[in-house]
Image (cartoon, rainbow, N blue to C red):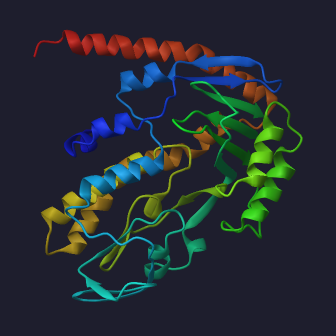
């Protein structure tokens, strides 16, 4: 938040924020078992949730007058020497740069070109996740509505235009899984969620018909060094912690840390990259360690686990809200 405040884009972010007010947990029969007032918690914590596409647009509009952008292109090769990096593109003419920063996600092409094949750095975290926009006829109101069965979760998330759905499930790594093969993804979803009730049959029908289905493994990225020569990686490309949140937050924080390091060491990329990893690594490390706990909390593997989690949320949510309110009152009462 301090970074986007310095960028003067907070009003735009709040304008684009989702309409979520609460989080409702359902049991296997589709009956409400717990509820959390998320809207109040986010206000107390000074947090904003918005669609990733809107975030990208806002960041682009804030920077387009200070940077050169190419859309609809991709890097095909990198060749670096002591003075810079020669870059070839699929469509644009070749260019030479002082440094190259790959901020191109979990399946980073820059990382593959500069560091090596993806399997060397990407590790399956035990889950798969799918997401797609739903027909407006499925209306969750202003609550995230989450249905759990052992090892599976279906969550409908309100948004400004159309609600979104997340389908997450535990599964060992699928040997022939292809992150780009949509028909394979639809078959996997049918086999995994086809026996569930509630609104799941309607959701699966929407997935079969949707051109916007996204599906991937929940994975972590672990690199001993985030830079190789004059090429560095950032965000999920360097240290993907999960697909349960924090990705954009960590990317913004990491980009700021990297920019500051480059500004402090304008002629020494090695020192800048070393500083970037030393500082940002302290923020990323705990998230990587917490992944298994977060996954177990959101997607319990057993009926007992679901029941315990729901009871915990029903008690802890209001208690946490009260603690935040007391903390705010304490800060407001301090002189100066």
- Relative vertical location of residue 329 with respect to residue 54 in this rendering, above or below: above
Q: Which of 223 and 20 is in front in this view?
A: 20
Would you say 33 lies left or right of 220 here? Answer: right
Occupied quadrant, residue 68: bottom left
**Residue in the picture at 78% in, 64% down:** 184
Would you say 332 lies left or right of 284 here? Answer: left
**Residue in the picture at 64% in, 23% down:** 24
Quadrant location, the C terminus: top left
- Relative vertical location of residue 311 with respect to residue 302 in this rendering, above or below: above
Residue 150 visible in the shown view:
no
Residue 130 visible in the shown view:
yes
Percent x, y of residue 331: 24, 15
**Residue in the picture at 77% in, 24% down:** 27
Would you say 257 lies left or right of 145 here? Answer: left
Q: How many marks?
A: 0
- Relative vertical location of residue 19 with respect to residue 59 in this rendering, above or below: above
Percent x, y of residue 47: 38, 32
Quadrant location, the N terminus: top left
Extreme residue toward the right, this view? 195
Percent x, y of residue 204: 79, 46
């Amino acid at each position: 938040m301090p970074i986007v405040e310095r960028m003067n884009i907070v009003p735009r972010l709040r304008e684009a924020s989702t309409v979520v007010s609460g989080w409702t947990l359902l049991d296997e029969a589709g009956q409400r078992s717990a509820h959390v007032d998320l809207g109040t918690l986010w206000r107390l914590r000074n947090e904003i949730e918005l669609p990733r596409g809107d975030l990208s647009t806002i960041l682009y509009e804030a920077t387009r007058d200070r940077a050169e952008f190419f859309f609809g292109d991709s890097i095909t090769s990198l060749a670096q020497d002591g003075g810079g990096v020669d870059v070839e593109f699929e469509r644009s003419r070749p260019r030479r740069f002082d440094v190259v920063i790959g901020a191109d996600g979990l399946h980073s092409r820059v990382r593959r070109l500069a560091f090596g094949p993806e399997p060397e750095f990407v590790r399956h975290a035990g889950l798969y996740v799918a997401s797609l926009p739903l027909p407006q006829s499925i209306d969750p109101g202003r609550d995230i509505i989450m249905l759990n069965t052992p090892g599976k979760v279906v969550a409908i998330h309100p948004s400004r235009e159309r609600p979104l759905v997340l389908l997450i499930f535990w599964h060992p790594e699928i040997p022939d899984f292809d992150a780009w093969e949509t028909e394979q993804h639809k078959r996997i979803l049918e086999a995994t969620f086809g026996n569930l009730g509630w609104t799941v049959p309607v959701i699966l029908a929407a997935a079969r018909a949707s051109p916007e289905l996204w599906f991937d493994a929940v994975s972590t990225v672990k690199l001993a060094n985030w830079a190789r020569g004059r090429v560095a990686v950032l965000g999920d490309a360097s240290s993907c912690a999960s697909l349960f949140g924090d990705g954009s937050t960590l990317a913004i924080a990491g980009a700021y840390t990297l920019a500051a390091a480059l500004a402090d060491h304008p002629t020494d990329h090695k020192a800048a990259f070393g500083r970037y990893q030393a500082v940002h690594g302290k923020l990323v490390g705990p998230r990587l360690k917490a992944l298994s706990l977060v996954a177990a909390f959101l997607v319990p593997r057993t009926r007992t686990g679901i029941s315990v989690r729901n009871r915990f949320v029903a008690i802890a949510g209001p208690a946490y809200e009260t603690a935040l309110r007391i903390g705010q009152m304490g800060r407001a009462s301090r002189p100066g």
